[in-house]
Amino acid sequence: MEGAICTLITQFKAYAGKDGSASTLSKEEFHNLVAAQLPNYVQNPHDAAAVDQLMGSLDQNNDGELTFSEFWQLIGTLAVQQGGFGL
């Protein structure tokens, strides 16, 4: 599990900060991450409107960026769905 956590952190950092803060994902960075890393887990990963809506649902403070904690909500939800644990 430690390896999986390190991978998530590494991937978040690889996409974050390319056009702003190195500790958050902008809308464009989130789109790129979802399309490249989660194409089979996120519905319509190449549909900008769908990904914008997903980002909006995760962005708790409505600042237009995702912190790692906000991003982690998505990972938790996807893991629950993938594992068949139900919400």
Image (spheres, grey):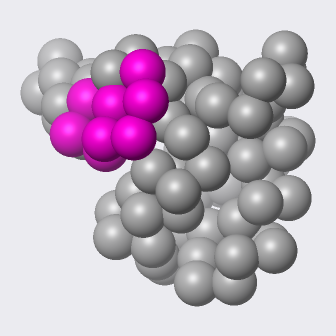
Q: Is residue 24 left or right of residue 56?
A: left
Q: Is residue 36 left or right of residue 69?
A: left
What secondary structure is the magenta-colored segment mainly? Answer: loop
Which of the 4 image quadrants contains residue 21? top left
Residue at 33%, 21% in the rendered image: 22
Q: Is residue 8 left or right of residue 34?
A: left
Residue at 61%, 29% in the rendered image: 66
Q: Is residue 8 visible?
A: no
**Residue situated furthest front in the rendering:** 19
Residue at 41%, 57% in the rendered image: 33
Which of the 4 image quadrants contains residue 10? top left
Q: Is residue 42 visible?
A: yes
Residue 1 appears at what percent x and percent y? 23, 24
**Residue situated furthest left in the rendering:** 3
Residue at 74%, 34% in the rendered image: 64
| 85 and 25: which is toward the camera | 25
Work out whether 87 lies above or below 53. Answer: above
Residue 43 appears at what percent x and percent y? 69, 77
Residue 41 appears at what percent x and percent y? 55, 68
Q: Which residues are magenta?
A: 13-21
> Is residue 20 rendered magenta in the image?
yes
